[in-house]
Amino acid sequence: MSIIKHAQPMLKGTLIARRNRFLADIRLEDGSKLTAACANTGSMKTCNEPGRPVVLSDSEKAERKYRYTWEMIQMGKTWVNVNTGIPNGTVRQFVDDDAIASLTGYPFIRNEVKYGREGRSRIDLLLTNTAPEKKRKRDPEPVPRCKPSKHADCYVEVKNTSMRADGHSVFPDSVTERGQKHLEEMMWLVRDQGMRAAMVYFCGRTDTEAFRPADEIDKRYGKLFREAVKAGVEVIPLQVKFTPKQLELVKVLPVDI
């Protein structure tokens, strides 16, 4: 289990409407209105209903045009994470806490490492047995977290997953050519490079019992997803419980292919 407290001050309110992909209008508890930044540029199906309770973070930066960021919305009894900036750092923290059983045993964790057939993609997390090269001679030596693993290096791609359908957490909530490419790159890592590759779906709601690809949204993504699983790409759907005070890793959801 891994619990992370929210670092920024939080405000409660009610969603008036999502104005566009980047902004949402909110009514605060005191009756005042404001426009908050929306980091989620997807369709936000099943987590974008006017009149629902929402939580905003306060950057405390008066110079920002939109000082507040929309963090989560309450759908029924569950809070749903809508900030796509949260999953990457959170999954790294989970890995660092050894909270994800299948991703333990690697001495070094690196962020945003270039990889792929053309070397133009960036992986969210790279778990390695060897220390990264120092950029400058005066930089301190990297400190290993643990003893080296017997596993091959593991490339981890993280996807924010907020949509619910028939009791499942599903991804994506809109057609994603970028997501399709990531699956192809992950298959290449496993088949041609002999590496481990893991798709971590960050399911930020607790009203689902399993994970599946959203074929009804992106048929090609679903096809590539099944090809990736067959090729040996690992799928790790993490169910994460959100509250206005903290977030908590609950469990790994079963995968319904």
Image (cartoon, grey):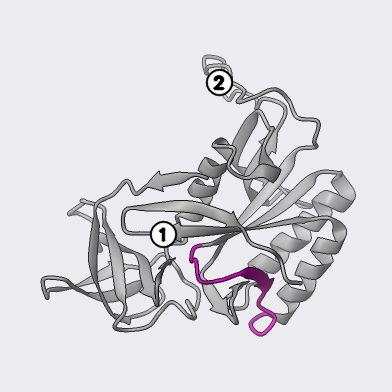
Label 1 – label 2 distance at C-alpha: 40 Å
Camera sees residue 65 = no
Please determine whether, in this image, residue 108 is positioned above or below residue 124: above
Q: Is residue 50 left or right of residue 92?
A: left
Q: Give residue 136's mark.
A: 2
Q: Is residue 4 left or right of residue 105?
A: left
Q: What residue sits 80% from the left and 36% below the top?
A: 151
The local crowd at label 2, few if under 14, some if 14 to 19, many if 20 or more residues have their Cα within 10 Å, is few
What type of secondary structure mainly makes up the magenta span? loop
Q: Position of residue 109 (x, y in %)?
A: 61, 35
Q: Nearer the viewer, residue 70 or 77?
A: 77
Q: Give residue 242's mark.
A: 1
Q: Amino acid at mark 2?
A: Arg
Q: What residue sits 52% from the left and 14% below the top?
A: 138
Q: Amino acid at mark 1?
A: Phe
Q: Nearer the viewer, residue 224 or 29?
A: 29
The magenta span reads 204-218
Q: What residue sits 67% from the left and 37% below the top?
A: 104
Tag 2, which secondary structure?
Answer: loop
Q: What residue sits 21% from the left and 51% below the top?
A: 61
| Earlier-in-chain disc, 1 versus 2 | 2
Q: Position of residue 230 (x, y in %)?
A: 86, 63
From the image, which quarter does the C terminus lie in? bottom right
| Magenta highlight on residue 81 | no
